[in-house]
Amino acid sequence: MLLLAAVFVTFSMQFFESTALVPALLRLTPAVLSGFVWQLVTYPFVGAGGASIWFLLELLVLFWFGRDVFWRLGRRRFWRLILVTAVVAAAVALLTHVLMGLAGGESTAPFITMQGHRMLITILIAAFATLYGEATILLFFVLPLKARWFLWLEILAAFVFGLLPSKDLAGFLGVCTAVLVVYTSLRSGGLKRGFHDWRKRLERWILERRLARLRRRRRFDVVDGGKDEIVH
């Protein structure tokens, strides 16, 4: 798979002085704000971390989930999902980083939680959990869980193993954004339609809160007419 090859090559390049600059330029950094805009797209395809058995296991996970998602979505939708999700997640992380800097709370390790192939794994696991929600996965090869629960497990793992030790709020919000974008895009039949549905739900929730406030303050009687509510 092309993804595995890209991750493995860039991971290997970081250990050689003559090639270490290449993966460094491809990773997501605040330099995006200075014109290194390609990092918004390239950062998920860079192998991250040190040389250990865990990297090989992560490649195996990437292959398992990536294969099934690719077969389900097809080539075009597969790549579009990865690229759109990566860019949106990076944009949210960068915005958070800038706002934290303005507030005087800038992270010392920005984006480490969402850096490199781990963001790619996050996207593909979220896609699998959305597409095959009722499938059973053996967590740690022992604990059986429905695939849909991995959406929440990814966020929990990013919080425990990413945000808590590194204080990388920008990276954590980037991971949360990636999970939300994948779920919304695949569950709602498209990213645009998904955000439209979320906007409608938000508008309805705000309307319900306003009606409840009116009922408490003015003692209005509210008649539930199904989707629309009429105030007398």
Image: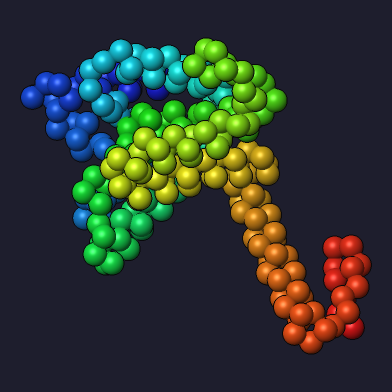
Q: Quadrant of the N terminus?
A: top left
Q: Residue at x 44, y 21 (%)?
A: 62
Which quadrant of the structure image shows residue 120?
top left
Q: What coloring was used for the rendering? A: rainbow
Which of 162 and 26 lies nearest the eye of the viewer?
Answer: 162
Which quadrant of the structure image shows residue 20?
top left
Residue 189: give x, y in percent of width and height: 68, 42
Farthest bottom residue in view: 218
Which of 171 and 182 lies nearest the eye of the viewer?
Answer: 171
Residue 12: give x, y in percent of width and height: 22, 19
Residue 204: give x, y in percent of width and height: 73, 65
Total marks placed: 0
In the picture shown, does residue 111 fall above or below 217? above
In the picture shown, does residue 142 fall above or below 210? above
Q: Residue at x 63, y 31 (%)?
A: 148
Q: Residue at x 79, y 79 (%)?
A: 215
Q: Quadrant of the C terminus?
A: bottom right
Report whether 189 appears left or right of 223.
Answer: left
In the picture shown, does residue 168 fall above or below 206? above
Q: Residue at x 31, y 56 (%)?
A: 97
Which of 189 and 29 lies nearest the eye of the viewer?
Answer: 29
Residue 231: give x, y in percent of width and height: 86, 80
Q: Is residue 189 visible?
A: yes
In the picture shown, does residue 213 fall above or below 157? below
Q: Is residue 126 visible?
A: no
